[in-house]
Amino acid sequence: MAAKKKPVTDENKKKKFVTDANLKIIFYLVLPLLLLPPFYRGLFFDYEADLAHMYTALVLGAYVFVRKDYIKLPRNLMDYAWIGLAAAYIISSYVAFNQRAAMEGALRVFNFFVIYWLLAYTVTNLREIKTALSVLFAAGVGVAFAGLGTAYGTFAFNGAYDKGLILSTLQYHNAAAIFLIGCGIIGFYLAASLDKVWMRVLAGGLNYIIIATAYGAGSRGAMLVAPIGLLLLIIGMPKEYRFRTFMGFLAVLIPFVITAKQVLSFETHSEVYYWSWLLGGFVIGCGCQYLVEKIADFSAVTRKQIIAAGGIGITVVSVGLILFMGPKIMPASIASRLSNFSLQDLSVVERFYFYRDAFEVVKDYPVLGVGGGGWNSAYTSYQSLLYYTTEVHSHPLQVWVETGTLGFLFYVLIWIGLMITLYRIMRKVESPEYRAAAWVSGVAALTVSMHSVIDFSLSLGAVAILMWALVGLTRGVERLGTKEGNKGKTIAGPIVRKAAGIILAGVFLVISGSLSIAAYTERQAGDAYNSGNVQQAIDLFEKAKKYDPVNYNYPMYLAQIYNYQAYQQKNIQLTRTAVENAKKAAELNKKNAQPLWAMAETYLGAQMPIEAAAAAEEAVQAVPWRQDAYNNLARVYLSSGNYLIQMGQQDNARTVLEKALTIPEMIDRQVAKLGPEERKAWRHGPIPAVDKNITEAMEQAEQMLSGI
């Protein structure tokens, strides 16, 4: 008798809406985002990031298309916190100082959110989790070889090596170091858990290269958090993997101690010398990892004896050699840099001023912040002394400045959610394989996050993608390990999911694509201008402005070009167009001195001297610690006074020229704010003073006043 078929119920239909095969396709589409960013200048620049956004938008659209099941409320705090953080960046863009930077900041955060979400909800088994971790590890291997090869002179990656430090394709040594440390932590897990012996042996050897390169980056911050991450990794690993993980650490430590000085002493030997030593270290690392495989076959009692008798001893001796005999083990330059860490170091002291000034910005804009990238527009008017930085050098503070307390709380909740997630996994998931995968993902993410507290490494998309991918994988392990399935309260049907998701992905794609077209057009405009084709440059900048209407650079450039053409052609219409563009540029990037100076020059060209003087005064308020600001102000005052005299407005001319005579008082009031500690920490340019330029300007102002 034939078996009866199960009736097709609504519940059965729901299960058929989404299949593992569909999710596998999306999962593998996400992997290029994990592998490629480190090889594309870290995705720090907007043009590169926008290309990545376009790809992410397409993957998101595909995900929404295959997910036709019902929308259910998430069961994890991280999910809600991430949605809140993305929303906070979008909201803050409406009150942003720099609207273009705020838009880009919102796009970047949304990109990271999508990567987190897709990895959390498309992994279907442990093998895929290991695949994702292996891809991240492979990215680390690529970054290591790019950095070492450039330092050895074999490759020619621009900005990958500088003055004895490896920057690799991320072009920033601190970011390269923490990226490699995060990948190295993954490597210890892979060397302990991959399915085949040869894979584990190869992972051990490659991890030696990753860790050695991380030290070659010479990042003191990364070396401060690396031991914490490694200790957490070993202590928290399930007991089934703890021994292998610890021994895998030794398998990297031994070749590192033997070869570090030869491998990392750049610019003193030939390429063959360096690659030979690196190959030797790799072989030793593979050999040590192979011994780990043999030792792992011993009984539990024997393994404990090995750890007690040899493992701990080797670790203590090796770490001691690195700490106390650094120049004997590593190149003197790197050893000195890593060991000479002091809170009195000027670069460290300066960062504390960054943090203090960031709190002042937060104090003035506590709720919604100043928008993505707002720090770069605002910091010069808040700084306690002159310094130059586009980033706060602390990601939590950067988030607080950009999104206010609202966004900062969501950011904190993500990490609280990660802690809770890891706790649930380690307590409730029976499978040690799942617990190990979750623990390494969580610890690697936390290690990168700890470093971001004291640096701006997360401003590089490659590092941020690494970290948020790891957080997403942790969430994916919880979903699979606790058999969460499709639980949760239903809030909408599949049609709503599909419509809302397609709209969201479409908006993401269109905005990113539009910004990419604008950036490409800007490059064409620059080439045209440099080649002397001014009209073509104007047409291209106007085109770029249409595709990216919130970018202050385009109207600023156009204001300068139109202003010059108006002067050459004596064309009043071009003058008006220049002024309109100058005003628009200043409106799109508030608090920033650059468009204000451009506006002052445009007003002078338009023979609007009173407006020019006001714009120059506002520009000085934006950069009160720069000597050239006061020199420019004096020049604008003189030019404005001269125009007013020619226009027969003697009273206004007298007012402007008398202001020029008060510049020394302005400088004295500003410099009086400097305490002895600030004077000691000052290291960028001169402290503002009445120099030759200002003295000459005052003399000219007095002569002009005497003639009125």
Image (cartoon, rainbow, N blue to C red):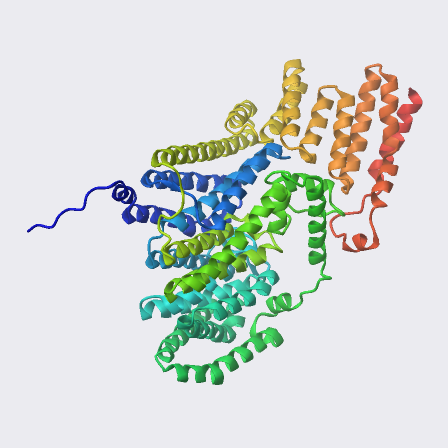
Q: Is residue 105 left or right of residue 298?
A: right
| Picture quarter with the C terminus | top right
The answer to whether 295 is drawn above or below residue 379 in the figure is below
Horizontal relation, residue 497 to residue 560: left or right: left
> Horizontally, is 328 left or right of 430 in the view?
right
Look at 48% across and 85% down and name the residue there: 309
Q: Nearer the viewer, residue 146 or 564?
A: 146
Depth check: give the residue in front, 202 or 269: 202
Question: Is residue 690 in view from this perspective?
Answer: no
Please name the residue shown 72% across and 27% down the image.
600
Visible residue check, residue 448 = yes
Q: What is the quadrant of residue 604 in the picture?
A: top right
Residue 677 point in image, percent of width and height: 80, 55
Instruction: Give the camera-side residue of 161 and 227.
Output: 227
Q: Nearer the viewer, residue 136 or 566?
A: 136
Question: Quarter-wise, where is residue 346 in the image?
Answer: bottom right
Residue 404 location, x and y as percent? 63, 42
265, above or below 480, in the image: below
